[in-house]
Structure formats: structure tokens, C-alpha cells
Amino acid sequence: MNKRSTMLGALSLVTGVCFSAVSGHVLAQDNPYPSRPITIVVPYTPGGFNDTMARVFAQKLQQAWGKSVIVQNKPGAGTIIGTELGAKAAPDGYTLTIVGFPLVANQFLYKKLPYDAQKDFAPVILGAQTPNILAVRADSPYKSLKDLLAAAKSAPSKVSFATAGTGTSNQLTMLYFDGLAHTKMLEVPYKGSAPMVSAILGGQVDTMFNNTPNVLPLVNAHKLRALGVTSLKRSSFCPEVPTIAEQGYPGFQVSVWFGLAAPAGTPRPILEKLNVALNTALKSDDVRKIFADQGVEPMGGSLKDFEDFFHSQSELWGKVIRDNHISAD
């Protein structure tokens, strides 16, 4: 099946035709939204930015509407447990789900999922994103991206890179770049971001792509050297670091992103009300500071903006995963 057609058709349906059902209109007319507490499902443990964004959104919605907003952490199975809970909730706007990179990647990594990423969710808002940084140890002989690639091309698998496991953004970013650069670096997988950072600091591996919040403090402490950032334009968090794009790979762009979704069939007036409220929240000074302190850029935009973004991400990472024959099964 053509994934572009599936995504466009599915998300057009959930943001267009489905909400026009009679039941949706009755719900909106008889029970002005919201009339009871809202739950935001977070498919992660507390502490990370996914959880932070959910709690910021919960606070802002509660302030705006005077109704309780509860954050429910449901981690496990690479986000699948919490995501399934959100996908199968009633489409009434009272259960929302934090979604991100795994929602895109998992649909290509697993032969069977208990939900359909392209059919079971309606976009609410793209909340934030942050680029990855390509880093080496501060005492590495590779002083620049050019040096790293020269070494990688001189002998296949000479240069090693750390990942946090199958299907993670750091693994897929490196495989994507490896293909564009026509190199073949050696992957060394670890069980999470912290172990891979420890490995590069300890000299077990040469390089890695990792999220800006995980790398920048170590760069600022002169423990790591940043060779490039995966945003199209230089990041405001590290403006001295050149982009990968400006170093000979125009158009190269990768972001780790964070969004909010509702079950498919949620009435459009509810989606739009949520979208407007959260766009307002993302523009507030306190929210922008919270995000900036964690190295994350607030985004926002319309329902259609998030739909288009999700589609472009599905096209990109579906191709990378297929080209590299990656599977989590």
C-alpha cells in the first residue's frame, strides 16, 4: 500500500469527515468541551522531556479551562503500551497522547502493532523539537566532520558509532547520514542514551548522534566536541556548531520531535479548541523558558501542519528503515 496515500487519506479523515458525525455534534452541543477531567497519556517514565511537555500542557489547559488535566505515565515496550492505550480511547477529547519519533519508526520496525499509527490518531499539535548533534570525545583525532568522514572512507568499519538500540533516533540518524556520505561506520548498540554517552567518554566508540540536551552540557564542559548539528539552520542553543547541511550535505535535517494526538474520530471542534489553547501556551514566556532550559525548541502550528509533518517523517524514516533492513521483531 502507498504510505503517502494512506497517511494523507487517514489523517484527512480523522481531521475532516469523522468529526462531522451526528454523535460528535451532539457531544459538542450537549456537553460543552471540556466538561470533565482530561487525561494525557505519556508512553514514557517520568523525568524526560516527553513527560515535562505533558505536565506543562496539563497545567496550561487547566489554567485556561478550569478543569483537571491528569498526566498518566504508561511506559513499556518501546512506547507501544501507552500508545495503544491512547489509540483505543474514546474519541471524545478526554484522552490525549504524547507522541514522537517512535510513533513514526515503530510502524516500520514491527510487522504487527496493536494500533495503526496512520489511522488511529488525529493530530492535535506539534509541540516541540530538538536536533541531534554529531559528537566525538574532546581529545578525539577527528577535529571536524571532514576528518571523521576521511577516516571512515579510508577503511570500512574503522570508525565506530554508539546507538541506544534498534530504531532509536540516534541509530537511524547515523544510518541515514552513512548512506548520504557513502561511508560504512561500525555500529555499537547500547541499552539507552546514558550507556552510549559513557562509552564514548570512555573511549569504547568514536562518535555518535544524540539529542541536543544529552550532548550540549558535555560539549560546554569540554568533554565532547560537536562536529555538526542536524537542523537546517544553526541551533540557537549552539550557534557556533555548523550544521551537517552546510558541510556538504544540503537538505540534511533530522529532529527529535514531541507532539500531542487524540484518537481518530475526535470531533474537529475539539481538536481545534485544543490546538488554539496549546498554541497560546507555547508562545508564553514561562513555557518557552522551560523548553529552552532543556534544549528544546517550542513549535506549534495548525492541525494540518502536524499532519504534513507526520507524513514527511513517515516517508523519510520508512525509507531509511527499509533500505537498511532494520526490524525490531
Image (spheres, rainbow, N blue to C red):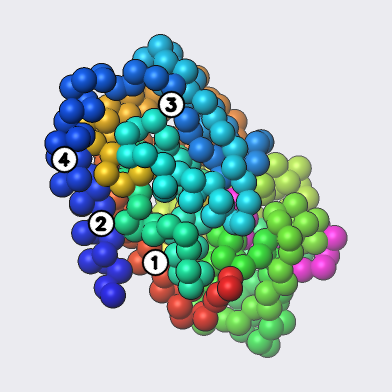
Give the amino acid at mark 1: Leu
In the image, is 188 to the left or to the right of 248?
A: right
Crowd around label 1: few <14 · some 14–19 · many ≥20 (10 Å): some
Q: Residue furthest bottom?
A: 155
Give the amino acid at mark 4: Ala
Q: Magenta span has 171?
A: no
Write down the residue under mark 3: 38
Whichever of callouts 1 and 4 sits on the residue coming sooner in the sequence is 4
In the image, is 45 to the left or to the right of 289?
A: right
In the image, is 146 to the left or to the right of 219?
A: left
| Residue at the image point whose x is 32% and y is 56% from the top | 119
Q: CA distance from mark 1 to mark 4?
A: 33 Å
Q: CA distance from mark 4 to mark 2?
A: 16 Å
Assign the C terminus to one quadrant of the image: bottom right
Whichever of callouts 3 and 1 sits on the residue coming sooner in the sequence is 3
Whichever of callouts 3 and 4 sits on the residue coming sooner in the sequence is 4
In the image, residue 240 sits, relative to residue 1, either above or below, namely above
- Disc on res. 21: 4
Give the amino acid at mark 2: Ala
Q: CA distance from mark 2 to mark 1?
A: 18 Å
Rendered location of residue 53, percent (x, y): 52, 33
- Disc on res. 316: 1
Rendered location of residue 58, percent (x, y): 48, 25
Q: Residue furthest right?
A: 202
Whichever of callouts 2 and 1 sits on the residue coming sooner in the sequence is 2
- Disc on res. 282: none
Element assignment for label 4: loop
Whichever of callouts 2 and 3 sits on the residue coming sooner in the sequence is 2
Query: Bounds of the magenta span?
Result: 201-211
Element assignment for label 3: strand
| Residue at the image point whose x is 42% and y is 15% from the top | 67
Crowd around label 2: few <14 · some 14–19 · many ≥20 (10 Å): many
